Image: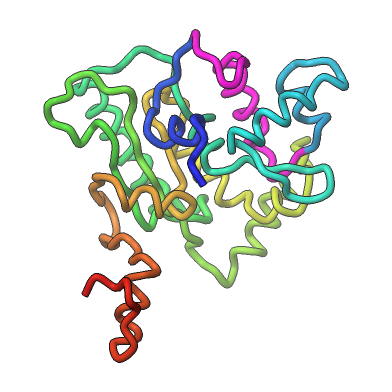
Amino acid sequence: MAESRAQVYAKRRMRIDPKGTIAHHPALMVRDCLRKLEARQTWDLRDLEQAASVKPGQGRALLQVLTVEGLIEEAGHDTWVITQAGQRLSSATAAKPVARRTAERVLHQFLERVDRVNRDPYFLGRVNRLTLFGSMLRAEVDLLSDLDLAVEIVPKDRERLEQENRQRVEELAAAGRTFRNFLEVAHYWHRETFRFLKGRSRVVALADYAAEKSFILKVPHRTLLGDDEEPPHSVRDSECRQKPGRRPRDCPF
């Protein structure tokens, strides 16, 4: 099945045309709507209408567009989640390109935040892998759309993670923070760490390595922290290796 225009755009183009559209909807509106919904693990039609600032009953057309474009998918009865393509689009920037020197400075600041996360006991997660990809790797490019990074965040202490995360959530709830469901509570430790790493920089386009691993390993990339990984073998390659005595007729070797 061919990818939608939005899926290809979200994977390969980290900039968004401020005057562009996605299925006749303003691209900036779609991006901003996804950004607001991204803070929630799951959401419903009413949440979508609030995020898109449309009147009750007018959100179903947008819901259909987002589904067809592959930006969201159904999670349950009348609930939806944002897909990987939707997450990429939500982090796209409409800002002007940045100079390589600026991107290098931002990368240095990001590495400092990574070091703090891994050293500071406040954070329940640590950065296990950091990967750079995108236009930053092309030495001939002086103006970059953004700084494309992917992080893999893992628990610092798996045995104590649930207890410490629950305590953190309870403290925030007592201070007035609301959590919609169990998933938001259970994964708060990861989201908190991810948000700190991203900061408020418009230059950084931060991706979850675990969620986008299959894409990242297929494009030029550089591992800045952690072990290198090889792209996953295709099913056909696996079949050829697993059954040397019964080689498929279309096996190339």
x%, y% of residue 126?
43, 55
Q: Where does the magenta region start and end?
A: 19-43
Residue 37 belongs to magenta span? yes
Residue lying furthest right in this view?
57
Position above or below: 185 against 39? below
Q: How many marks?
A: 0
- The quarter of the picture where residue 245 lies is bottom left
In screen coordinates, is 154 left or right of 26? left
User: Which is nearer the eye, 168 or 87?
Assistant: 87
Q: Which color mode does the image show? A: rainbow
Picture residue at 25% right of the left edge, 46% below the top: 221
Picture residue at 40% right of the left edge, 54% below the top: 214
- The quarter of the picture where residue 244 lies is bottom left
Residue lying furthest top in this view?
19
Picture residue at 20% right of the left edge, 23% below the top: 100
User: Which is nearer the eye, 192 or 167?
Assistant: 192
x%, y% of residue 2?
49, 42
Residue lying furthest left in this view?
140
Q: Where does the C terminus fall, quadrant-wise?
A: bottom left
x%, y% of residue 4?
52, 35
In screen coordinates, is 244 left or right of 31? left
In screen coordinates, is 168 left or right of 92? right
Position above or below: 142 against 220? above
Residue 101 belongs to magenta span? no
x%, y% of residue 113?
37, 40
Position above or below: 103 against 168? above
Picture residue at 42% right of the left edge, 37% below the top: 11
